[in-house]
Image (cartoon, rainbow, N blue to C red):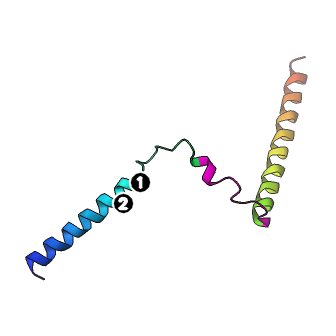
Amino acid sequence: MSLQTLEERVAALEKEVARISGRLRPFGEAGRDDWKSVVGMFANDPIMKEIQEEGRKIREADRRRARRGIKRKRRSHR
């Protein structure tokens, strides 16, 4: 490969990286309206409904365990 060809390829790559970089935000800088792009993403998705239901069951079980722990503590202080 000639030096000129290599220089041309590197220049083309640098130009493409600059073009792509101009379209992207730096990591961690969310746009004000980014949330709008995901609203409804999983609407009517049966797998997502299953995931939500399993999460609900886990949260309810955690609440029950927490309530039992609070009741035990109250009894031991009397």
- 17 left or right, relative to 42: left
Q: In the rendered structure, which amino acid carries the disc numbered 1?
A: Leu
Q: Which residue is mark 1?
A: 24
Residue 78 image offset from top left, x and y in percent:
90, 16
Question: Quarter of the image holding residue 2?
Answer: bottom left
Badge 2 crowding class, 10 Å Cα cut-off, few under 14, some 14 to 19, many 20 or more, is few
Q: Which residue is mark 2?
A: 20
Nearer to us in this view, 52 or 10: 10
Residue 19 image offset from top left, x and y in percent:
33, 60
Segment colored magenta: 35-46
* SS assignment for the magenta stretch, majority: loop
Q: Is residue 39 above or below residue 63?
A: below
Residue occupying the point 89% across, 28% down: 71
Residue occupying the point 75% across, 61% down: 48
- 33 left or right, relative to 20: right
Badge 1 crowding class, 10 Å Cα cut-off, few under 14, some 14 to 19, many 20 or more, is few
- 53 left or right, relative to 75: left
Q: Which numbered marker is on residue 41?
A: none
Question: Quarter of the image holding residue 69?
Answer: top right
Quote the CA–CA distance across marks 2 and 1: 7 Å
Is 44 magenta? The answer is yes
